[in-house]
Image (spheres, grey):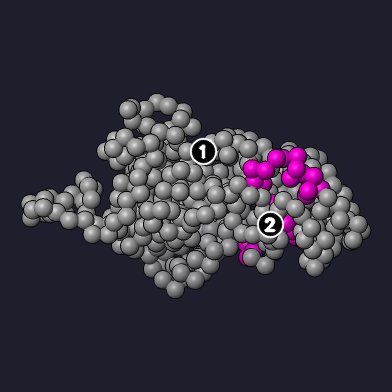
Amino acid sequence: MARADDNFDVRTQLVRAGRRPALTQGIVNPPVYHASTCTFETLGDFDARRADPDSGLLYGRQGTPTIWALEEALTGMDPGAAGTKLFPSGVAAISGALLTVARPGGHILFPDSAYEPTRGLAQGLLKPLGMEVEFYDPRIGAGIAERIRETTRAIYMESPGSLTFEVQDVPAIVEAAKARGITTILDNTWATPLLFPAMARGIDIEVQSLTKFIVGHSDAMMGAVTAAPGHWPRVKAMAKRLGQTAGPDDVYLALRGIRTLAPRLRQHGETALRLARAVGAHPAVSRVLCPGLPGDPGHALWQRDFAGYSSIFSFILAGGERADLRHLIDDLALYSIGFSFGGFESLILPIEPAPLRTATRFEADGPAIRIHCGLEDAGDLEADLIAGLDRYAARTGSSGARAAGGAATR
């Protein structure tokens, strides 16, 4: 069978990658290898493997054919990537990426829209290690150059932000970073390399929570760090020092999920844009935070940089209090309250972005909601959500003006 890194479209590669006969022995899905100790017949074999640990099995934590298959598939998704290491969760992957650049006295820039656990790592992990952490306006673009210091070691990005969906001008930030020899790190969970090929856009280190779209079924937790050639040795060494790996059964679920990523992501995105437009037209909603809609502050950058939309967006209700959300949420038939996104089931999540901000202000007329659009029928999801908004409006008397296209304005 031809290698998956031939000149095929990435959607084809997702089906083929990580299925080399050396890893699978011809089995369509790479088998699940449970391993800790790996034995050797002779001292010569043992010494040779220790001298070249990437040449085959050495110890379970160093990897097995199951793990290598997924790492190879993830690396192949991102043209220009040198390699990928797996972690037991997305937050563990973020930690590993940050520790590759952390040095006492160093300075790291984070967007003010960053994922809440990322903020926790910045303040609770990096600061005690002697790092200086600074949060910046995610829409700063080329202006990031003014925040760079002699001690700046990395610029972290998350685009769009996973609660409020600010789209960052990644190319402009990368250009400013490269001019000063500064590492760039991108949390690319929202888009995956399928919608935003991070390495091709100049990113040095990419983080994904595989728990979301890659696994796709809300039944396994995992993270990954993918690196460009100049940064791969550091990422690989850090993962080894930290002892980070992932269980083979979870890796198998991620391998199975990656094969259907393209059609799932397409349906997620189509449904999300349909629901965002419908929500934006409802009188109970004052703003929709969705860069896929015209009128959103990030729409032009999203059109320029992304190959499609993802599954989540947020909206602000026109008045009311958090306690009033029960009128919207409690009688929904198709949405469950829950964290995460990327699974086949739709989710609704009350969010409170304002207390998290330190560099910018987030203002809202009423409670904020995030929606993850699953793989249910889009018409059914729309009808259920609109009925919930009708209940909310009837109980609170809420109504609000909307921007063109139902998009957010700030």
SS of the residue at dot 2?
strand
Query: Could you tell which of marks 2 and 1 lies nearer the N-terminus?
Result: 1
- Residue 194 image position (x, y, % from top left): 51, 38
Q: Residue at x 46, y 69 (%)?
A: 125
Q: Can residue 178 be seen in the rendering of this structure?
A: no
Is 19 or 176 nearer to us in this picture? Answer: 19
Q: Can residue 326 be seen in the rendering of this structure?
A: yes
- Residue 249 image position (x, y, % from top left): 41, 53
Is 102 or 286 nearer to us in this picture? Answer: 286
Q: Which residue is drawn at 54% across and 63% down?
A: 117
Task: Give the residue pinned by disc 2.
Answer: 336
Task: Give the residue pinned by disc 1.
Answer: 260
Q: How crowded is mark 2: few (under 14 residues within 10 Å), some or many (20 or more)?
A: some
Q: Are marks 2 and 1 in contact (CB under 8 Å)?
A: no
Q: Which residue is drawn at 85% across and 57% down?
A: 392
Q: Which residue is drawn at 77% across and 61% down?
A: 330
SS of the residue at dot 1?
loop
Amino acid beneath label 2: Ser
What's the magenta region? Answer: 357-386
Amino acid beneath label 1: Thr
Residue 112 located left or right of residue 33: right
